Image: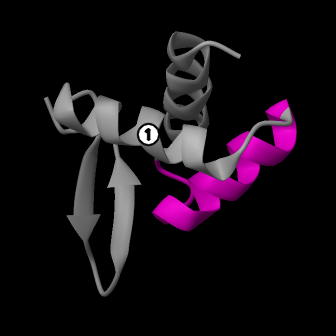
Amino acid sequence: METEDIKKAIYELVEKSMGKKLLKPGDVFKKVSADNGIDKKEVKNALKELIDEEKLVYSYKGGSYVEIPPK
């Protein structure tokens, strides 16, 4: 699976959970790697790219979570 496809899967997962549940980075790694049959390390690298591109952000609310940045 290409990095861009992984990034798209991560973004869609976070987008679907908005307003319902906050996702921890570990939740994202597990879900995306299990759904697509890829290594968690690849998912971690793709998530890092999304954070660097400012498409997603880490938030700290009693723990670390991944969210879409407020507009």
The region drawn magenta spans 19-36
Kindly give the residue lying farthest to the left in the view shown. Answer: 71
Residue 16 at x, y percent in the picture? 59, 35
Crowding near the residue tagged with mark 1, few <14, some 14–19, many ≥20 C-alpha atoms within 10 Å: some
Q: What residue is at 21 percent from the left and 38 percent from the top?
A: 69
- Quarter of the picture containing the N terminus is top right
What amino acid is labelled 1 in the image? Asn
- Quarter of the picture containing the C terminus is top left
Q: Nearer the viewer, residue 64 or 29?
A: 29
> In this rendering, does residue 69 appear at all?
yes
Q: Is residue 14 magenta?
A: no
Q: Which of 49 and 24 is in front in this view?
A: 49
Residue 53 appears in which quarter of the rendering? top left
Residue 47 appears in which quarter of the rendering? top left
Q: Which of 70 and 47 is in front in this view?
A: 47
> In this rendering, does residue 17 appear at all?
no
Magenta stretch, main secondary structure class: helix
Residue 58 shown left or right of residue 20 in the figure: left
Residue 3 at x, y percent in the picture? 53, 18
Image position of 52 with respect to 26: above or below: above
Residue 41 at x, y percent in the picture? 57, 48
- Residue at the spot of label 1: 45
Residue 3 shown left or right of residue 39 in the figure: left
Image position of 31 with respect to 55: above or below: below
